[in-house]
């Protein structure tokens, strides 16, 4: 083997090693990104389970109108927000703590997550009015800027939206670029009781 062949072999090995290192770094970065997203899903599910485990009548406890308005405004681009009436605690004075915190910082594996839980009311059609079909999307009632106290032909539901955001790594360096959202509807109506004897 000549000196030229040795130099060419070393150059080829260097190129292959450089490509392998780049591939390993890319795989590690992708793995860390997926791990952060998986943690965000877990954090969102935990916040949603907390809300689902409480009676709908106390979900708004301790939430002031200005805090609710600012959190809805800050998350106006999130799916479901535009179809949800803002709800807050009307008790005066407000309790010292919120039953479900609007903003809740969580840290997992060195990444800081911001958990925002938005709770409001939307209405679903009952199909009892002329020309109205039951079901469909839970939305605001046409022409009503605020959740109406009287709502013929509709049933109110509580919408809970959990928004988890984080800023870590290159792909999430800008605030709001990495967000995971989950939402659900909670029916606050009493369940039917079946009479089994008599």
Image (cartoon, rainbow, N blue to C red):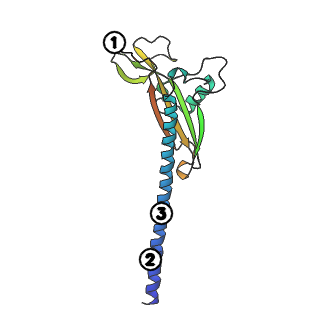
Proximity of marks 3 and 1: CB atoms separated by less than 8 Å: no
The N terminus - image quarter:
bottom left
Q: Secondary structure at mark 1?
A: loop
In this rendering, would 87 be left or right of 197?
right
In this rendering, would 3 be left or right of 111?
left
Question: For residue 175, which quarter of the picture?
Answer: top right
Q: Nearer the viewer, mark 2 or mark 3?
A: 3
Q: Residues within 10 Å of mark 3 (few under 14, many from 20)?
A: few
Residue 2 appears at what percent x and percent y? Answer: 44, 90
Which residue is outermost to the bottom?
Answer: 2
The C terminus - image quarter:
top left
Which residue shows up at 59% across the image and 34% down it? 103
Q: Secondary structure at mark 2?
A: helix
Q: Which residue is mark 2?
A: 12
Q: Which one is earlier in the sequence, the residue at label 3 or at label 1? A: 3
Q: Which residue is mark 3?
A: 24
Q: Residues within 10 Å of mark 2 (few under 14, many from 20)?
A: few
Proximity of marks 2 and 1: CB atoms separated by less than 8 Å: no
Q: Residues within 10 Å of mark 1 (few under 14, many from 20)?
A: few
- What distance separates the C-alpha of mark 3 from that of mark 1? 69 Å
Residue in the foreground of this view, choosing between 97 and 13: 97
Q: Which residue is mark 1?
A: 197
Q: Nearer the viewer, mark 2 or mark 1?
A: 1
């Amino acid at each position: 083997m000549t000196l030229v062949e040795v130099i060419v072999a070393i150059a080829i090995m260097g190129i292959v090693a450089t490509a392998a290192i780049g591939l390993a770094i890319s795989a590690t970065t992708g793995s860390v990104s997926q791990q952060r997203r998986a943690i965000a899903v877990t954090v969102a599910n935990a916040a949603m389970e907390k809300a689902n485990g409480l009676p709908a009548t106390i979900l708004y406890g301790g939430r002031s109108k200005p805090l609710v308005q600012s959190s809805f405004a800050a998350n106006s681009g999130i799916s479901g927000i535009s179809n949800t009436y803002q709800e807050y605690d009307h008790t005066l004075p407000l309790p010292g703590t919120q039953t479900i915190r609007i903003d809740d910082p969580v840290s997992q594996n060195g990444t800081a997550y911001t958990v925002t839980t938005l709770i409001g009311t939307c209405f679903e059609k009952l199909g009892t009015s002329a020309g109205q079909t039951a079901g469909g999307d839970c939305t605001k009632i046409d022409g009503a800027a605020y959740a109406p106290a009287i709502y013929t032909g509709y049933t109110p539901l509580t919408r809970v939206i959990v928004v988890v955001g984080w800023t870590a790594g290159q792909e999430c360096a800008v605030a709001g670029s990495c967000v995971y959202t989950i939402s659900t509807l909670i029916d606050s109506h009493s369940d039917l009781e079946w009479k089994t004897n008599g």
